[in-house]
Structures are given as structure tokens and as C-alpha cells.
Amino acid sequence: MNGLYKLRSFLADFHPIVHSLIVGTVFARAASSMSMPFLAIYLGKHTDMSPVLIGLTIGAGSLAGSVGGFVGGTLSDLFGRKRVMLIALYVWAFVFLGFALGKSTLLFLLLNILSGLCRSIYEPVSQALMADVTEPEKRFRVFSLRYTAINLGVAVGPLLGAALALHGGALPFLVTAFVYFVYAVLLQVLLRCFGIKQIEGQKKERITFRGAWQAIAGDGAFRYFIAGGILAQISYSQMSVTLSQFVSGKFADGIKLFAVLMTVNAITVILLQLPVARWSEKRSPLRSIAVGSVFFALGNIGYAYSSNWWMFIGSMVLFSIGEILCFPASSVFVDRLAPEGMRGTYFGAQSFINVGSFIGPALGGFFLEEYGGSTLFVVVALISLVSIGFYTSGQRRFEASRMQLAAKEELPS
């Protein structure tokens, strides 16, 4: 009975659309994770593309995504979350169908650009919608639940993808296309049932792309946030790129160790997300990000000086706690910076921090080759700590602007 009461209380805490988006995120991420990690292998086996072309094709999606978020977020403020999200999901479904059926190099390049755009449009707009229908004091928990859902999907997806790939190279892409299409149809029905149009009708002003760009470009607090986010991404990106090279060079069975580390990361995030979220809810987003950045630094320093599997595993746990603290808190930070009526624009513009995901692997590869892994991970640990200063400056700018606005409102008209 107690468990049933807790379940009912949990369901009552958030708008039904929040629950729909969180459950949908599990299936959507599992579906994309069963296909996209195998895209390079698939292209190598089923096309005559060179490794360089395959790399450029896959990288094009990330590059498109770094700017697509701003476009999608602004469109959602202009035309509504529902319309923009559904278009992105339906197009995404046909993108995966294209991966399964396509043959030409140009087509695969265009499909991956579209995939990056769809992801960068759907994800910030869904975050903005979650914030729209959730009380401010509950938003950290919502973003934490969303992040847990992402990790559940990512933990399950690659295993399903590997199993499906045994029955045919294109099968994972066909299944992903089907899952995204069904999710889009169900979400369209749910959005209609729960009256999202009424919520979207509460926006107080119309904006233009030019006005949206001027707003975020002129927001000093947001610029500091983006700078801090880029530095954080430089540090975080080492986990999936240079860490694998470092451990495989350090141990004879380093590839197995890296697989174990990825599993430890997923399990840590899933198990500790809610307890850490309860702690973070009572603190400011800046404090959560600062503490999380310290854990990132500790994890990276641990990698630098680890000499056996258990030390690497312990370092990954520390690094994962930093991930749990930073990512949901960053979403809350953006939510607080966003002016009324521009939440979609700001969540979309958050994708600019992905510049760090481009810089990080190149920088990491340089340090790994020239100075070794220990130096690399000490450097990125320092970068994590430096990012705290940018986030702090952004918070101070934000507080100063709020005080100025409050002072103006108190002046007699």
C-alpha cells in the first residue's frame, strides 16, 4: 500500500505530459542508441565510403546540431512546442528509414545532417515544454528524471542494436524508424488530450529570429554560461574519446576495461540520480554545477593516476556523480536565465556549448600523443575547475540585471 501511495504521489507531482515525455525519452534514446553507434560500421560494410568520408558524415550531424537547437527553440516560441516537436519526430522517423534504404554517399551525409537537426530541435523544445508545465521548485527533479531516462535508454539500446544487427545490417535502423513514428503518433494524441494549446497561449509576446538572436547575444549572463558549458564539454568529451585510447594503451585488456567503465557510468547515473536530485533541489543550480565540476575534476585526476582496474572504476564513479550534478542543474540554470516567452530560444541556444565537444577530442588527442594520458587528464581537470568561474560570473550578471530591473519597477511612473 505504501508503494502504491508513493506511485500515486509521484504521478500527481507532475503534469501528465511530463510523464509522457520521460517515458518517451527512454524508448527514443534506446531506439537511437541501437542504431547510431553502429552507423560507422554499417557505412563501412554497405557503402564504398572511405574512413575519412564516414568520419565527415557522422561529424556533420553534430555540427548541424550545434546550431539547430537555436533555430528549433526559437521556432517553438514562435509557433508552439507541439508543432515543432512533432515535425522533428516525424522527420526523424523517415531519416532512420532513409539510413536503412539509402545507398549514396550524398544521401547519407544529408540524412545525418537531418538527424542532428532533429535531435537538436526536439530535445531543447521538449525540455522547454517540461518547464512550461512544471512549477519552478520541481524543475530540477524533472530534468533529473529526464536525464535518468536518457541513461536508461542509452544503457539498453546498444545491446539491442548488437542483437538486431546479427539479423541484418539495416534492421536496427528500421526498428528505430518504427519506434520514432509510433512515439510521434502517441505524443500527438497526448498533446491534444492535455490541452497544450492553452499553455502555449500564455506567451506574452511574439519574437523574431533577429530579436531572439539579439536577446541571447546581448545577455551577458548567458554568454558566461555558454563559455562555462563549452569548457565543461571539453572535459566531459574525453570520457567517450581519449579515455578509451588511454586505457587500451595502458592495459592489455584495456578495451574490456573501457566497456566496464561505460557500464559503471550508466549504472551510477541510474542508481544515484534521484538521491542526488533531492540534495540538489535544496541548493542553487550554481552550487550543484560547482560541486559537480569538482567531481569531474576528481574523476579526471583519478584517471591520470590510476594504476589498476579498481582505481579506474572508482574514478568513473566520481566522474559520473559530477555528470549527475551538472547536467540537470545546467537545464535549471538556463530556465532561470530565460525571459518569459523565450524559454525555447534559450534551451535551443544551449546547444552552442557543443562547440566544446568538437574542441575536446582534438585537444585531448594532442595532449595524449604529445604529453601522455596523465598530463591530459590533469589538464582537463583544471579546465573543469576553471568553468566554475564562468558559471559564477554568469550568476552574478544575472542577479545584477534582476536587481536593476527591480529598481526600475520601483521608480514612480
Image (cartoon, grey):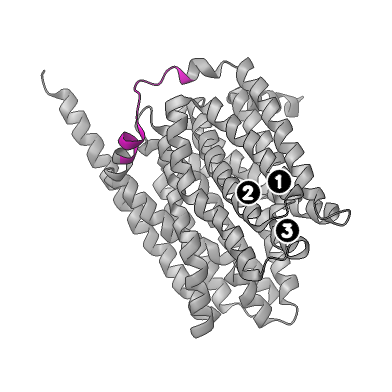
Separation of marks 3 and 2 at Cα, in angstroms: 15 Å
Dot 1 falls on a residue whose secondary structure is helix
Residue at x 42%, y 66% (from the top left corner): 383
Q: Is residue 70 above or below residue 259?
A: above
Q: Earlier in the sequence, mark 3 or mark 1?
A: 3
In the foreground, 138 or 23 = 23
Residue with the mark numbered 2:
111
Residue at x 40%, y 63% (from the top left corner): 385
Q: Position of residue 186 (x, y in %)?
A: 70, 26
Tag on residue 98? 1
Q: Callout 3, which amino acid? A: Phe
- Is 302 placed left or right of 400 in the picture? right
- Confirm whether residue 371 shows in the render: no
Residue at x 75%, y 78% (from the top left corner): 253
Q: Is residue 215 above or below residue 110?
A: above
Dot 2 falls on a residue whose secondary structure is helix
Separation of marks 2 and 1 at Cα, in angstroms: 7 Å
Separation of marks 3 and 1 at Cα, in angstroms: 15 Å
The quarter of the picture where the C terminus appears is: top left
Which residues make up the magenta segment? 200-213
Q: Nearer the viewer, mark 3 or mark 1?
A: 1
Asked if the stretch drawn in magenta spans residue 391, the answer is no
Q: Callout 2, which amino acid? A: Leu
